[in-house]
Amino acid sequence: MIVPIELKNTRVVSYDITIDSLPKLHFDTKVVIVTNPTVAGYHLEAVLKKIDARELHVVTVPDGEAYKTLQTVESILDQLFIHKLDRQSLLIALGGGVIGDMTGFTASLYQRGIGFVQIPTTLLSQVDASVGGKTGVNNQYGKNLIGAFYQPRAVYIDPAFLQTLPPREFAAGVAEIIKMAVMFDRDYFTFLERAELSDEPTLKEVIRRSVELKAEVVNQDEKEAGIRAVLNYGHTFGHVIENETNYTTYLHGEAVAIGIVMANRLAVKLGLMHPEEAQRVTELLEKFTLPVDYMIPDVDDFYEHFFLDKKSANNSIKFILPEGIGAHRIEKDIDEVLIKSVLAEFGGNR
């Protein structure tokens, strides 16, 4: 099963997203696999047997969002110089979204850009993070504020990797799947309401449809000048939650799930979404054991964090909101009082 990427509106870039068992991969160059200890323990030995390269090295970095930093990227770059990679060399990201983002960003920097391949091992990275070429790291001001749009040479999605995924990590990936359905495909949302993802054919179909939806968006808008911004549904709120909790309390998908509930609450207040539809989304998130509530310590401080988001411009916050299930609206210049009234519903004075 292959989903093509064709970036016709920017420059001629194309690559395939293969959804199947990981095939044998042959590279007539130096290759460095970037991974973390957890993923390496489960999958590295099997993946090494699938890769044939002129030289093959492994770089292991610490596990977790807290290590998605420029310092970690610099440590990867040091290893690339030690192994004397050249401009024909290749990086392979073996891991979840953190590994994929950092490996892609490192590839964009090394000698002004070398190739990289994504082998995502979490549900979140398979359906979202590995597709579309967003790379980067976090800093003290927020999430993914340092990075680049840099497309991989290929993406290999093997659902078998998910067999070792902890339930909480699996659920975090489902949040991004629900995001896609609410924004773009009402029928898909209805399908998810009755879907059992423990069923292997159903899971593979869900991965395929989610990747197709994201590929359709990326093909139209690689660098988020228009419709690709819609993929940030739930993220404007979620990124603030992650920042407030120092990336240690919630997984990315969990923060997005809470952000989706907050965005829906705003959409209801604006008359874009019926309360019953917002409740259906909340119930679907809860079906997959995702968090749907958060206690905001300081509403004013939470609101100010919006202005550090990449999607804000000219002191205006851009909100991605559902227009019912299956449609979307990008809203700017929403009244501050209205936004804070939504935040207050999640605040300490409830």
Image (tube, rainbow, N blue to C red):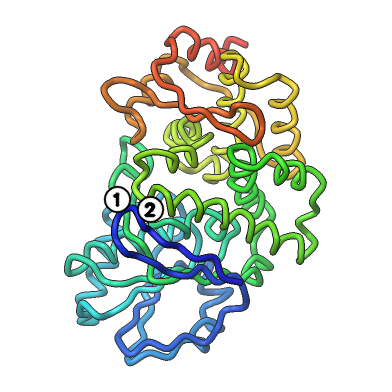
Residue at screen point 55% across, 31% down: 328
Tag on residue 147?
A: 1
Could you tell me the amino acid type at mark 2?
Lys
The number of discs equals 2
Residue at screen point 70% across, 33% down: 281
Q: Give the image location of residue 168, x and y in percent.
A: 65, 51
Tag on residue 109?
A: none
Label 1 vs 2, first from the N-terminus: 2
State the separation of the CA atoms marked 1 and 2.
8 Å
Label 2, secondary structure: give it: strand
Could you tell me the amino acid type at mark 1?
Gly
Q: Give the image location of residue 27, x and y in percent.
A: 37, 87
- Please identify the quarter of the rendering in which residue 132 is found: bottom left
- Please identify the quarter of the rendering in which residue 52 is found: bottom left
Q: Which residue is mark 2?
A: 134
| Image: 247 above or below 97 | above
| Position of residue 93 in the picture relative to residue 167 (left or right) | left
Residue at screen point 69% across, 68% down: 163
| Position of residue 66 in the picture relative to residue 238 (left or right) | left
**1 and 2 marks in contact (CB < 8 Å):** yes
- Please identify the quarter of the rendering in which residue 23 is found: bottom right
Q: Nearer the viewer, residue 248 or 188?
A: 188
